[in-house]
Amino acid sequence: MDFALSPEEAAFQEAVRKFGDKVLRPHERQIDSEGRIPDAVLQEMARLGLLSPLVPPEYGGLGASAVLTELAAEEIGRGDFSMATAVFYLLEAGWGWTLSQHGTDEAKREILPAVTAGKAFLGIATTEPGGGSDLGNMRTESRREGDGYVLRGEKAFLTGVEEAKRLGGGHLTLTHNRNGSGFNFLYVPTNSPGIASQKFENMGRMGISTGGLTYADVRLPLRYRVGEEGKGFQYAMEGFQVARTFVSAACVGAAERALETGIGWIKERQAFGQPLGKFEGIQFEMADLYTQIEAVKWQCRRAAWLIDQHVMKGDPSHRSEIDKVVASVKLTAPQVAFDTVRRVMMWFGAAGYTKDVGLELGFRGIMSYMVGAEGGLNIMRIILGRELLGKEFVPYK
Ligand SMILES: Cc1cc2nc3c(=O)[nH]c(=O)nc-3n(C[C@H](O)[C@H](O)[C@H](O)COP(=O)(O)OP(=O)(O)OC[C@H]3O[C@@H](n4cnc5c(N)ncnc54)[C@H](O)[C@@H]3O)c2cc1C
């Protein structure tokens, strides 16, 4: 066992941290207030290989490992505290990888080079207005017709709807398979005829949009099906294992930044004749936060390592172990990050409540991962319940 980063991993991590410090931090307020990530920032991400790094080089990616991608997610979550850039990054990383693994050659050639160049957005569409947790009960359906599929239904709360309209691109979309059993997983370009969109006004991570799409007999070519007909659910679940790991890593980066900000403050801020950090009450809180962050950080890296050892190699063994580790980190990381931001805000007193200190950016952004993005906390608990008690005891519903 070796916990040290390889020289390649350490150099990549340093390069992404530099990008976070020099490019993301100076732009984060603008990203939040203008409601978009500037094109220049996306172009710089493309230049550094940060738009879907797992994708093989033949499609414009780095062919990076999940560990490398996880390290970058930490740094991007630390760099743009609003989480908007991290969300853009992790969705493309996770779902770009799924497309590169299971998409048709024509679709990969058409879509992935644009995604890795920052000229298209790629996201995920599973949630519907009727609910996002109980995916088995979704209504959206696809049926075979001629040499393609016809899609009908509605999805909601999708990240990147406006970005896909503006840049081009679309979402990997989970649909009922009308021709038989199971689900189809289809790439749906957002600008296709028959699609209408709606934008939701979120409370945070303003630099990336959330919207709804309705599909009125949208025609899609056969080449846009990801994997086999009727087996879409399994590709989506595999993709969630990967994307949830990167979500958690972004939360770790944000938590580390919040704690560092707090440590800087408590060494300086005077109360009752000494710096706040001299009071044990504050030191103990700091120690607890550090311990929680370190625990979830290393669990995240373990999740990425397990994904490299098995999922990336198409090896379905260890599925249960990976499900447990990923559900644990997606359950813990947003809570640890939120808790860290909340407590550090209180160390700042009134200043913590201002936009000058900037902790509210993280407070609003991280909350998206508490309420549900990439799966609600209780869904992670349900996965753990099923895996710990056994599928016979807690069967899939
Ligand atoms: C900012 C943001 C971005 C998002 N981006 C995307 C995206 O890009 N693509 C996409 O498809 N979806 C996206 N979502 C939606 C997200 O996947 C859903 O919010 C999530 O799956 C939960 O679904 P829901 O919101 O419909 O809540 P519901 O499914 O209605 O659940 C409501 C609450 O009840 C809990 N709950 C549900 N079932 C149980 C149970 N059996 N036991 C105990 N508790 C339960 C849930 O955890 C949740 O807290 C996004 C959400 C947000 C907030």
Image (cartoon, grey):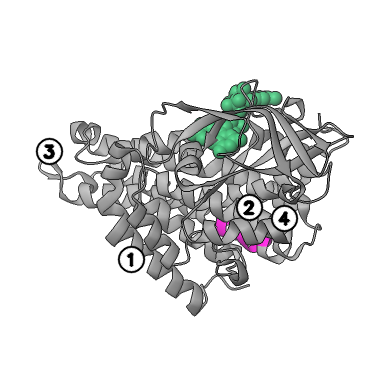
Q: What is the three-letter code of the residue carrying label 2?
A: Val
Q: Residues within 10 Å of mark 2 (few under 14, many from 20)?
A: many
The residue tagged 3 is: 272
Q: Is mark 2 within 8 Å of ligand 1?
A: no
The residue tagged 1 is: 18
The answer for how far apart the CA atoms under marks 3 and 2 are is: 48 Å
The answer for how far apart the CA atoms under marks 1 and 4 are is: 34 Å
The answer for how far apart the CA atoms under marks 2 and 1 are is: 25 Å
Based on the displayed image, in which of its 4 quarters is residue 179 positioned? top right
Q: Which mark is residue 103?
A: 4
The residue tagged 2 is: 242
The answer for how far apart the CA atoms under marks 4 and 3 are is: 63 Å
4 and 3 marks in contact (CB < 8 Å): no
The residue that appears at 23% across and 52% down in the rendered structure is 264
Based on the displayed image, in which of its 4 quarters is residue 355 positioned? top left
Residues drawn in magenta:
299-307
